[in-house]
Image: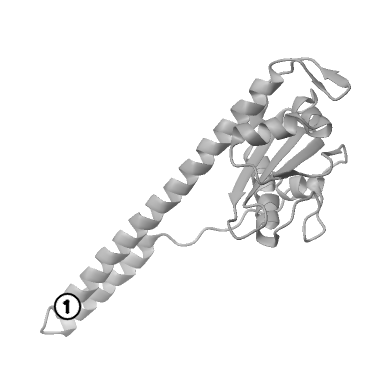
Amino acid sequence: MALDLYAYLTSLPLQSPPPYSSRTLPIMTTRILLAVLCISLLHACDSQSPLEELTDEIEQLDDDNREDDDNNNDDNNDDSSFESEMTTAINQARSSGRNCGSEYFPAVPPLSLDEQLIAAARAHTQDMANNDYLGHEGTDGSLPWDRVQEAGYQASTSGENVAAGYRTVEAVMEGWLGSDGHCANIMRPSYQDVGVARIEAPNTQYGVYWTQVFAAPR
């Protein structure tokens, strides 16, 4: 199990968000095109077998699409469950005063889970998992405030905690709260929002990677 050597805090100004990515065409478009093709074949052929084959293909596409949706929903539900659990743990810690090393922090208001900060946390966690390292600087040279900016969050202040090897939210929170800088990030009164991420990578030295991203808007 490991924590980064220090927690990252910055108050640098951030810029405007990048454009959103486009979405792919829905399966209904494919269905319409295949239906038109079916009609053409029905008029052109004496046998119904091509139509039956195309009907089977349409049904298979529907089945595949439903299966993909189910898989995506499972992944989203897993992420949502973890994000809720971690945010609850953070806010429970913030609800009571505590010493972070030699500095005392009184109880502070809860943080709100923010989608843009989740995106920033996921991007860095995935980078650490893919490249088997622990730290605040990404393999592309990005630092925490860069990733917050790239995710589109306009921050007046931000910070980041990372960890690896811990298996549960309870365990990693205990590690962070036992470290002066990480504890201070969790308890800092200037933060209003948080994004969190956890990624398992079995074939790496740590196996599990964690990120918390804290910020307040301008």
Q: Amino acid at mark 1?
A: Leu
Residue 91 coordinates in the image, percent (x, y)? 65, 23
Residue 180 coordinates in the image, percent (x, y)? 83, 30
Q: Residue at x 70, y 48 (%)?
A: 151
Q: Is residue 40 left or right of residue 207?
A: left
The image quadrant that residue 154 belongs to is top right
Q: Is residue 165 left or right of residue 41?
A: right
User: SS class of the residue under badge 1?
Assistant: helix
Residue 15 coordinates in the image, percent (x, y)? 81, 46
- Give the position of the C terminus as an image quadrant: top right
Q: Residue at x 40, y 57 (%)?
A: 68
Q: Is 123 rendered above or below residue 117?
A: below
Q: Is 107 rendered above or below residue 149?
A: above
Q: What is the tally of numbered marks visible in this picture?
A: 1
Q: Is 181 rendered above or below residue 47?
A: above
Residue underneath mark 1: 42
Q: Is 13 rendered above or below residue 93?
A: below
The image quadrant that residue 189 belongs to is top right
Q: How is the image coloured?
A: one colour
81 or 115, nearer to the observer: 81
Q: Residue at x 17, y 73 (%)?
A: 52
Residue 154 seen in this snapshot: no
